[in-house]
Image (cartoon, rainbow, N blue to C red):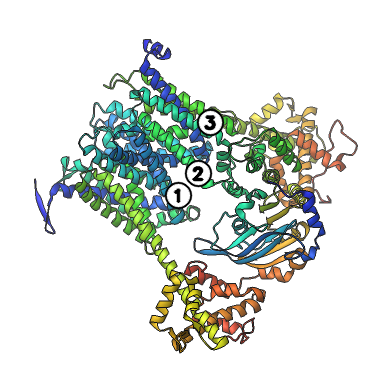
Amino acid sequence: MDDLVRLLTLRDANTRVVLLGATLLGIAAALVGTFAVLRKRSLMGDAVAHAALPGIACAYFVAGRSFVALLVGALVFGVLSAAFVSLVKATTRIKEDAAIALAIGGFFGLGVVLSRIAQNQPGGNRAGLDTFIYGKAASMVSADARLILAAAVVLALATALLHKEFKLLCFDRDFAATQGWPTLGLDLLLMGLVCVCTVVGLPAVGVVLMVALLIIPAAAARFWTDRLGPMLALAAGFGGASGMLGVALSAVVPAPASTLSRGWPTGPLIVLVAAGIFVASMIGAPRRGLVADLVRRVRLRRRVALQNLLRDAFERGEETGDPARPWTPRDLRRPVRGETLRRAVARGLARPGTAGFVLTPEGQAAAARVIRAHRLWELFLIEQAAIAPDHVDRDADEIEHVLPASVIAALEARLAAVDRDGPRETPIVPPSPHAPGATP
Amino acid sequence: MKLAGPEAAGIHARAAVPAAAGRAGVGVSVEVHDVTVAYGRKPVLWDVDLVLPEGRLVAIVGPNGAGKSTLLKAILGLVPLASGRVTIFGEPLRRVRREIGYVPQRETVDWDFPIDALGVVLMGRYGRLGWIRRPGRADREAARECLRQVGMEDFAGRQISQLSGGQQQRVFLARALAQDARLYFMDEPFAGVDAATETAIVEVLRRMREAGRTVVAVHHDLQTVPEYFDHVVLLNMRLVASGPVEATFTRENLQRAYGGRLTLLDEAAEAIRRGGGGA
Amino acid sequence: MSWHTIGGYEVRADDLWTVATAAACSVSCGLVGCFLVLRRLSLLGDAISHAILPGLAIAFMVSGSRSPGPMLVGAMAVGVLTALLSSGLSRWGRVPADSSMGVVFTTLFAVGVILISFAARDVDLDPGCVLYGSVEMTPLDLVPVLGVEMPRALAFLGVVLLVNTAAVVVFYKELKIVCFDPYLATTMGISAAAVHYGLMTLVAATSVASFESVGSILVVAMLVAPGATAHLLTDRLSRMLWIAAGVAALAAVVGYAMAVALDTSVAGMIATVALGQFVLAALASPGQGIIAKQVRRLGLAARICREDALGILFRCQENAGGGLSAREFRSRVGGGGALGRAVVRWMRWVGLVEAGARGEVRLTSRGLEESSRVVRGHRLWESYLASRAGVDPSRVHEPAHRAEHYLSDSMRDRLQDEVKERSDPHGREIP
């Protein structure tokens, strides 16, 4: 409890730095990652991140421990790996996925070799690789946080200024090319931004988890919106929140008692928070979420079942010539579920009688509306869209349940000949085009 | 960039004698000189030599695999040429890019992209905006007007995957309109669209022609060629015929394009393929 | 410490064990990797090899030991889970395929890191070893197998190698057809899904066996590089598998030797060598390589240049009876460039052309024979295009100029049969 208070009030300078750094990193990675995900290049980030290792090792040989040199080295190799992937894809029969995997494994192998050699040199750093892969967010110092801040500002600026260009590139590359935009250059620039972000984040969260920060917030944000602007904002929010919550949790939550470990590692916790946001988004997002999807599907199925029931009951009335004649579910053309029947009764569309069910006047009217829409649509398809009449019924079956009232109204207007005398209480049901003697 | 005003180009179109399209009378929009294109080692276009008139609706027709889309992409610089060159309005492509509109085949687009119909149309204005500048209110208005022209103004805020095939096509047509280009390339604009959209597209194409624009479209429906287009290019890996529809769209030419390929020509193509493309 | 003598060099037994372990790892990865490359699932291999971390950690915690049984089960379960989750996310969540893989494997990796950081204090699972392996250490941990003391890792990898080989041999046909056309396979009653998840299980098992030796990231290179290299070297699946196995073993041996020489990580060096092999194959493969393509192109350009030169002289002699001045000839062949000059020199050397009485260049009788064949092809082609293919006579020269270099003798004869004329559309005689 005391820890939590200390954390939330940011009293501890060290926690403040780590919290700020992780939050900013999450935001920056999410902004760049959104475009990488939309460009279907999210795993290129993986390759670029792994390729940073040999770059860092090379820079170490050349310039020692200068951080700028390490950054430049990582950038150079990151772009090199992106170029390797493009080149392999363009000049050989090897596909992009294998090229990316080759870059990940091969460049990383080179990095391991080089950094081991570097470590063997006098004065070499012994604890290089582990940090590189897993990251050590807790040991972030204010210089790191400042660097992340600078990178975040640059990345945010770049994505804001080039928003339009990247959008075009991701959505429709060919179109962008015909318009004279340098698509290759933009692609490389995007990869360069991914690279900057990765390199800056490596010391904090490590290679693999950096990839997570690039991909997961963007993928989560996609569930909530169908527009790019809000998606970027949401992704940035998710990324920032993951960083912040991850750090907070690792500072607050004690490790399981059975272990000797002092606490939860920060980097993986950040990723787990992001993953939690992703799962919550996937399940709970309105419209694109799984639950919304399920609800929609159940509703549609219910509506279709009810309308089918009404239609069948109505048509049975037409066949027998007596709409008031009771029927049982077995009399109808399609099987009826008890639940559907109960709902029809509950809504006052049908009512149970002694010998079976009958449609109420409301039910009659509703059935007539459904059938009318169905037959209007049939006619529309035949007359307007030159679709062979044989195929019409199946299409109409699906579409009449989907058709909103406004479209039905439009159809009515279009097929004015059907109903010249204006609207009436009970709509006229036009004859089905399948009926003998009907003119197609 | 100054685009050709509708009046000026319109006079062009009307002053032309329809039968004399090609080299004389009408302005030239696209010139294709001996273009050969190969995918990998397989030539898909072979020695195509072509002059298209300005201010006309041009159809590129031919059997499946005839290289129709490839010809379009070759003209637009989207595929590398194994040999030959292309000029547009007498200039190399890169000088006139901003005067060219493009409607891609619908399959090539990522439909799950987070963008609405208006956003897609706005992309048509990006070219004239240049780097970094964002589209403003005037651009939005122009985009809306373009949507209106294709009868899609009610769907401006709809995410594109939630549009029907025909509506998607109309949105892309609206984007082309928003480009306000002099020359349009369309890859199968009528593929998989409903009758209403087809009518709407034809209507828009005619209006474009009246404004003096040139439209070059890959087309698959032979029956509608004489009705919709003025000029036809018959293609079957090689150029079979090109000219005004009345003179060119003949049974004989169609048979040459669609009737079995000449075996020796095929063998030579195969020999060149094995040799590694054009000289 | 025991020493053996191989080819005059003294080699420690430990070195042999290490190389054998590395090779077993590399070859078993290379075999399954071929199918990953062909099925375009390389990145799923990457994802699985990262994601098995929590499987390992859980197996650890539950069984409390590092014995292969629980670890295999844990890793295979998580490996298949990765494949299932990735495809589930992209199907039901409408997440792009690559992103869904990224989401799944990074999350699982994070879970794994947390579990290991808790477990690391109790058991000897070293986070560093997980990443880049410690194949150098394998000879330190020996177990008796069939009366021989061999490294535990090698015993484990040997079994995996046997299983992989057996699976590839037994299910060769099924794997082949599923790689080529999953839908066709399904219609033929071979469940593409079963083969897919079977393959993923093998990948997971191979990854976990390779884990100790090469780590979770370098195993990606071992999985994909040999298959990709072999894919560049052959067009047949059976050969591709053999080549991949050979290339993988070679990478292990060379990698080990270089690592020892440079005093650096063996696993890292093997991955580097594997990448190097791929680059080499991409450059120098006889069929697919960039160099081979350039050589072929150059050869073709030289032939076209020579035939053009012959054509120029033939037409010249046909019109005026005389040859061309040496200077003009040089400037017209190949545009006077380096290739053209080389071709002219070569033609003189082999006796296709000679210097005439006034210093002009003339065709020799052999040159005349060869040039008339070229010109004949050209003019037959022109006639054919004009009379049979309906090409406008004014436009037949360019295509014929291109085609003349590719016509075989039999095609020329068939052209002769098709074309009845004795002269080309420009009225010149067909030789």
Q: Secondary structure at mark 1?
A: helix
Q: Are marks 1 and 2 in contact (CB under 8 Å)?
A: yes
Q: Secondary structure at mark 2?
A: helix
Which residue lies at the image location 39% right of the left edge and 20% below the top edge? Answer: A17
Q: CA distance from mark 1 to mark 2?
A: 10 Å
Q: Chain of mark 2?
A: A
Whether labels 1 and 2 share one chain = yes
x then y, percent, for residue A186? 52, 43
Residue A187 - label: 2
Q: Are marks 2 and 3 in contact (CB under 8 Å)?
A: no
- Residue C152 horizontal side relative to residue C74, left or right: left
| Quadrant for the N terminus of chain C in the image | top left
Q: Is residue B190 visible?
A: no
What amino acid is labelled 3 in the image? Answer: Ala
Among all residues in the image, which is located at the extreme right? A421
x then y, percent, for residue B105? 63, 51
Residue C349 - label: none
- Within 10 Å of disc 2 (Cα), the crowding (few <14, some 14-19, many 20+) is some
Residue A221 - label: 3
Q: Is residue C294 above or below residue A46?
A: below
x then y, percent, for residue B249? 74, 66
Q: Which residue is mark 1?
A: A86
Q: Is residue C105 above or below residue A257?
A: below
x then y, percent, for residue C363? 47, 85
| Quadrant for the C terminus of chain C in the image | bottom right
What amino acid is labelled 1 in the image? Answer: Ser
Q: Chain of mark 1?
A: A
- Within 10 Å of disc 3 (Cα), the crowding (few <14, some 14-19, many 20+) is many
- Residue C354 horizontal side relative to residue B207, left or right: left
Q: Secondary structure at mark 3?
A: helix
